[in-house]
Amino acid sequence: MKVILGLSGGVDSSVALKLLKDQGYDVEAMFMRNWDSATNNDILGNPDIDDDVCPQEKDYQDAVKVAEELGVKINRIDFIEEYWNTVFKYFLDEYKSGRTPNPDIMCNKYIKFNAFLHHAENLGADYIAMGHYARVRHEKDKSYLLRGVDSNKDQTYFLSQISQKQLRKSLFPIGHLTKPEVRKIAHDANLYTAEKKDSTGICFIGERNFKDFLKNYLPAKPGKMVTLDGKVIGTHDGLMYYTIGQRKGLGIGGSNEYKNDAWFVCGKNLEKNELIVGQGHDSEYLLSNKCYASSLNWITDKPDENKKYTAKFRYRQADIDIKLEFIDDDHMVVYYDNVRAVTPGQAVVIYDGEVCLGGGIIDTVYFNEEKRMY
């Protein structure tokens, strides 16, 4: 059984590679190169963009060292154009519309489990494997995506848009492990990446100053920062730089007119280019109890409207009890008790116990039938 694993140069995929080899698979590694500043700037038609070089070359060298340590062949493939067309353009378009996208979800859907899968199959792979904290249960006719055992690292939220066909061809070798257990395996095997820190940047783009990076591709439009009752209290750098519920970076100083409670982003008015802010972490304006979602994707079975499920509206959020109502095959309403900062552009991911059913992308948010301005 031939398996090709996506080796990123990090500790998780390194341990996944070791486990596959130990289990007797005919395994190869493949490193994906999906971002190149010069190439992407040419696509955009602006070769003068000042964009730092992504550290993918260092990651590649780390991946090569791990593959050599384990005696595994490593392939290298460029998906730069595919990443730009299916992930990064989506990322920019969402920000242009005032929403907050999740590029990692689209990266999994279109790159890691699509472009990668097709290339791996051309190399004769029966399965692909990734170092995600998730599990898969393959049955005769269906496969089920299960939460990772480590609840703090579970990545099924980011896998919610993959298809049944993609899941049928996938393995997740470390999904039954916790992060400390993965680190221990790496140390015991003396893997080169055993102490390498986890990456936290945008998928394949890396860690960088978000504002500086984004302004290279989207022109900033500064505007007024206003309170919930419309009083101007400051200025913002551009609506795309802020997300619902954000506290840091607002730059609102003390005032005798307002309480000392912290300020939070409560909404955006795209027509007026205004950022709406309010005081208090639990401000009622940050709460909602209904949202509409589209781009629905069900990995195994479509949920039953008459059954209760749980959902996550953001990564690492505690499960929320929900009820679903389907408008059509691509649109649904999600009902829930008051939840803070449910944000358009983010995913709502539905769970039936340990099984991740899939989900959709949040379009609009309501509180007691009042549409929130985000």
Image (cartoon, helix red, strand yellow):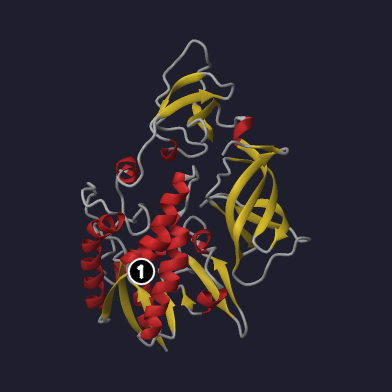
Residue 192 visible (yes or no): no
Determine which residue is flagged by label 1. Answer: 13
**Label 1: element kind:** helix
- The residue lying furthest to the right in this view is 306
Residue 328 to residue 250: above or below: below
Residue type for callout 1: Ser
Left or right of 186? Residue 163 is right
| Residue nearer the viewer, 133 or 303 | 303
Q: Residue at x 40, y 56 (%)?
A: 89
Residue 371 visible (yes or no): yes
Residue 283: where, in percent of width, then height? 60, 30
- The residue lying furthest to the top in this view is 256
Residue 42: where, in percent of width, then height? 25, 57
**Callout 1 crowding tier (Cα within 10 Å): few <14, some 14–19, many ≥20:** many
Q: Residue at x 22, y 54 (%)?
A: 53
Residue 299: where, in percent of width, then height? 59, 70
Residue 301: where, in percent of width, then height? 66, 71
Q: In which quarter of the view is residue 118 placed?
A: bottom left
